[in-house]
Image (spheres, coloured by chain):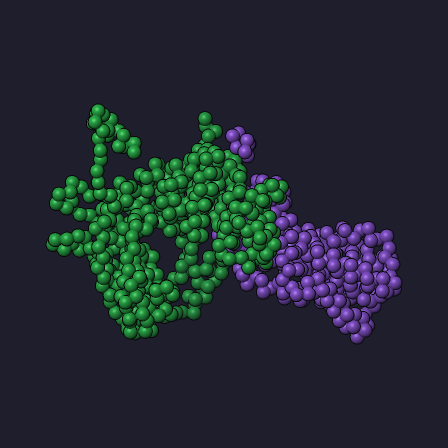
Amino acid sequence: MADDIVIRAEGLGKKYVIGHEAERERYVALRDVIARGAKNAWRMAADMVKGRIVVPGDTVEEFWALKDVNFEVKRGEVLGIIGRNGAGKSTILKVLSRITEPSEGRVTIHGRVASLLEVGTGFHPELSGRENIFLNGAILGMTRAEIKRKFDEIVAFAEVEKFLDTPVKRYSSGMYVRLAFAVAAHLEPEILVVDEVLAVGDAEFQKKCLGKMNEVASHGRTILFVSHNMGAVLGLCSRVACLVKGSLKCEGIPQTVVNQYLAYAGSLAPNAIRELSPDVAVAVERCEVEIVKPARGRLHLRLTVGLNVHERASVAIELVVRDTLGVPVGWASVGALNSDQKLNLLPGRIGVTSLHDVSVLGDGRYSLTIMISRPDIEYLDRWEDCLQFELSEEPVLGAERRLQLGWGFGGVEFGYISHDVQPGTSAESARLALSSF
Amino acid sequence: MSDLTLPSARTLIIEPGRAERHYWRDIWAYRELFTILAWRDVSVRYKQTAIGVAWALIQPLLTMIVFTIVFGRVAKLPSEGAAPYPVMVFAGMLPWFLFSSILSGASNSLVLNANLIGKVYFPRVIVPTAIGLVSLVDFGINFVLLGVLMLWFRFTPSWHMVFLPFFILLAMLASLGPSLLMTAMNVKYRDFRYIIPFIVQFGVYASPVGFSSSVVPAKWRFWYSLNPVVGAIDGFRWCVLGGQSSLYVPGFLASLGVVALFLWLGIAYFRRTERSFADLI
C-alpha cells in the first residue's frame, strides 16, 4: 500500500549563509575602506529590507548543511540516522519538525509529528512540577485534556509524587530529567522524531528511555532516531541511514550500515595532542599508544601520557577502552585502586608510560579515554576518545582463529570445559541439543 | 490507540515557502499553547516578586502623583472639563501602561524564549502576542485602582463606559504592530532591545499621559494624532470621563489608520522573517 509511507523526503536541502572577513591589505586606503563599507552597508540594508539574514563580513559563502537528501520511512518503522558531528543529522530533524525551513526540496508527512530534540524544553525553574507538566506537555503539542488524562501516569513514571508542588529549581538533576522525560514519553504521536535525548541521565535512566521507546515503536508508531550511540541505534532501529557531509551515503540493515559508517569514521590516530585549559592542576597534553608484542608472550598496549602539572598533586591515571559501538569493554589504571601506585607529581611537564595486557580483546578497532584523578576525590582531567588503536594478531600457535570484534560476539571467548553425549542418541541430535542450549 | 491503525487524515507538506499557506489555521490550532505561555508568564511574575501584586499598584500610583503635581499644579495645565486632574491622568495612564508593557515585554519575548524557538515548532507569533494577555492582567489591577480613585473623588462615569472594551482592544492592537516589528528585528539585531526603553521613556511625554490632548494647539492636533497611542488614550478618557471629554474625530481616525498601518507592517515583516528565527536565535 502506497499509504504506508509516512515520511517521504525528496531532494531536501538546507543552506546557511556564512560571512568571511576579507584579508586586509597592508596599506589601508581610506577610499577603499569607505567603498567596502558602503558596499557592505548596501548589501546589509538590502537584506534587512527583504527580511533576509544579515551576515557580517566582506564576502558571504553558502554552506549546504543538507544537500539532495531523499528517503522514505514506512509506518511502524524505526529509522536511525547516524553521522559525525556536523553531518546534518540535527538539521534533518529540525526540518522534519518544522523548526527551520528547508531551502529546497520537499517533505511529505502523513500523521501527527512530535519532536523531541531535547527533554524538558520550556521547563521553567520557578514553576512547580505539576505546572511544568502542563507547560511542557503543551509545548510538545499535547492538548490540556490529554495531559490531564495522563497526568497520574506521568507522575508515576517520573517518581516525583512527593515533590509535585515544589518548584523544579529545587529538584535534583536526576528528578528534573526524569520528570522531563516522563512528559515526553507520554506523547502519543503517530511519528516521533527524537534527537540525542538519551545522552542525558544515568545508565538506569537510559535503559528506561530505550525501553519506553521500544514500547512506542511496537505500538505501530514511526520513530526517527538520531544518535551517536551505535549500541542504541543497533538495539532500536529497523533501518539505519548514514549521513556524510549533508548527504545520505548509505542506508539499509542496521548492522551493515553501522559497519560501513565505522569503517569510514574511524581513522587510526597513533597519537594526539590538544590545546590545554591552564586552570587545572594536572592536564593531559598529549598521548600516544602503541601495540607491542613481546617475542614470547601476549599482546600489550603501551600508553604514553604527556602531563602538564601546574601544582603538586598525587594522582592516578585511568584508561577506558571502548569498542567501535561505544560500549566500554575494559578499564585499566595506575594508582586508582592501589593507592601506593599513585603518582606524586611535581610541577612541570612529565611523561608517564604504562603497559597493559590487552590479549583478551578480540581483533578490531578500539578507542581510548584517558582520565586523571585524585582517586575517590575528583577528576582533574578527562579526555574522551582521544586515541584509537587496532588489534589484529595472527592466531597463536595451536589456536585455529582469533575472535573478530566485527562478528558481534565481543572480545572474550569462554574456554570450553566439557560436554556429554548420552548413550543411544545420535551425534546429530546431540549437537542440536547443545546448540539449542 | 485505535486511531493509529487508520491512516491519518492529516498530511503535512514541508517545502520552502510553504509555511505561509496554513498560517492562520495553524495559529488557531496552537491556541492552548498561547494561553499556557501567557499563564506561565503571569504566574512566574507574581512568584518571583517579593511584594507581588503591590508592585503593580505602587508604580502607577506614584506616576499619577508625579504627573498631577508636575503637569497639574506646577505647569497648571487644564484637565478635561470638570474631571479631577488625578482621574484624568490615571485614565490616560491605563492605556499607556498597557501599550508600553506589551511593547517592552513582546520585544524581548522571542529572545527570552530562544530555547523554545530552537527546539520545537509552533507559530512563532504566539510568543509576543501572549504578552498581550499578561499585560492585560496588570491592566486589570490598574483598572481596579482607577475605580477606587473615582470613588475617592466621587466621580461618576457615564454610559460611555460600555465602549471601553473597544478602546482596550485598540491600545493592544496599537502596541502589537510595533511589537511584532521590534521582536522580529531583535532576533536578528540584538541592539534593538536598547531602543525600546528609550521609546517607552520618551513616549510617556510625547503622548497625552500627564496632560490632556486638548492642550495641543489646534493646528497641530491632527499631526499629533498620528502617534498611535493618542487615539487609544483619547478614547479611554472619553469613556471614563464621559461628557467631560470630547473626542477629536479626524485625529482619532488618523490614529486608527496609523495603528492599522503598523499592524500590517508588523505582521508582514514578522511572517517574512519568522522562518529563519530558529537559524538565528
Left or right: where does residue B170 sit relative to residue A158?
right
Left or right: where does residue B255 sit relative to residue A69?
right
Give x and y (percent) for residue B188.
52, 57
Left or right: where does residue A320 sit relative to residue A105?
left
Vertical order, A265 against B185 (above or below): above
Vertical order, B94 against A130 (above or below): below
Q: Colour of chain A?
A: green
Give x and y (percent) for residue A114.
51, 42
Q: Residue at x 84, y 62 (%)?
A: B150
Q: How many marks?
A: 0
Left or right: where does residue B20 sit relative to residue B162?
left
Vertical order, A160 against B75 (above or below): above
Q: Residue at x 30, y 66 (%)?
A: A339
Q: Colour of chain B?
A: purple
* Along the viewing direction, whichever of A143 and A52 lies nearer the viewer: A143
Q: Residue at x 14, y 53 (%)?
A: A297
Give x and y (percent) for residue A160.
55, 51
Give x and y (percent) for residue A255.
32, 39
Q: Residue at x 26, y 32 (%)?
A: A434
Q: Quadrant of the N terminus of chain B?
A: top right
* Along the viewing direction, whichever of A218 and A118 lies nearer the viewer: A218
In the rendered image, which quarter is residue B105 located in? bottom right
* Along the viewing direction, whichever of A162 and B173 lies nearer the viewer: A162
Whether residue B280 is visible, yes or no, is no
Whether residue B168 is visible, yes or no, is yes
